[in-house]
Image (cartoon, rainbow, N blue to C red):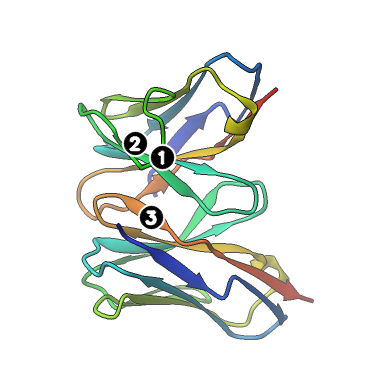
Amino acid sequence: GAVVSQHPSRVICKSGTSVKIECRSLDFQATTMFWYRQFPKQSLMLMATSNEGSKATYEQGVEKDKFLINHASLTLSTLTVTSAHPEDSSFYICSASGTGDLEAFFGQGTRLTVV
Amino acid sequence: KQEVTQIPAALSVPEGENLVLNCSFTDSAIYNLQWFRQDPGKGLTSLLLIQSSQREQTSGRLNASLDKSSGRSTLYIAASQPGDSATYLCAVRVNDMRFGAGTRLTVKP
């Protein structure tokens, strides 16, 4: 299957700072990318859907000014958590799909801890 | 908005048993459905992808079926092993991709 690389895998940051998470499709063009958040013992909750070159569509309850998503190229999307707070600590996972059968490929996830 | 439900939430079986995990979804106009496995603290491993035009997919001891009209999918695991212990997630793709809450499977030696 296709490969999606997510970086970093773990990050610890201080409260009030910003953190950027990268999601790259290594061997295909990702026309659509999804960003998810997963709290302990819970399932993946969709945060936003982004199509290359367009503004992301955020799910209800997700602050677009706090979680900045950029999908400027067909191989890279970034999620920036701005002014992070301890309650933003979570596991963030990206997913990418191209055209065709629309199979989604997932990154390895980023465990964010805000102290 | 698409709602995805998985039952049971948790399942514990002795090694060797065959088992069925269930997934249902409210909007049948899907592009595809995927089953994933997630180990504690880890990312997702894709198990099977079923396109909307397909009825089932098989990989080794795993078989997934899809009945789009009734909004249901099942994941059948044959001859379960302790290494199958994990959380199993189904996800449906429309314009977005949404997950069920998962079934936490424990296979006892």
Q: Chain of mark 3?
A: B
Q: Look at discs 1 and 3 and give the one toward the viewer.
A: 1
Q: Is residue A75 above or below residue B8?
A: above
Q: In the image, residue A89 lies at what x, y percent?
A: 62, 32
Give the Cα separation between the discs numbered 1 and 2: 33 Å
Chain holding disc 1: A
Q: Quadrant of the N terminus of chain B?
A: bottom left
Q: Are marks 1 and 2 on the same chain?
A: yes
Picture layout, residue B79 above or below residue A113? below
Residue furthest right as drawn: B109
Q: Residue at x 40, y 47 (%)?
A: A105
The 10 Å Cα crowd at callout 3, few under 14, some 14 to 19, many 20 or more, is many
Camera-nearest label, 2 or 3: 3
| Numbered disc 2: secondary structure | loop
What secondary structure is found at the residue carrying circle 1?
A: loop
State left or right for residue B2 relative to residue A63. left
Q: Which mark is residue A61?
A: 1
Q: Is residue A96 above or below residue A44?
A: above
Inter-mark Cα distance, 1 to 3: 16 Å
- Of circles 1 and 2, which is in front? 1
- The reply to whether label 1 and label 3 mark residues of one chain is no
Kindly identify which residue carries mark 2: A27
User: Could you tell me residue B16's position as x and y percent?
Assistant: 68, 84
Mark 3 — residue?
A: B98
Residue type of the residue flagged with mark 3: Arg
The residue depicted at 26 percent of the width and 56 percent of the height is B94
Q: Position of residue A60 (x, y in %)?
A: 36, 42
Which sits earlier in the primary sequence, circle 1 or circle 2?
Answer: 2
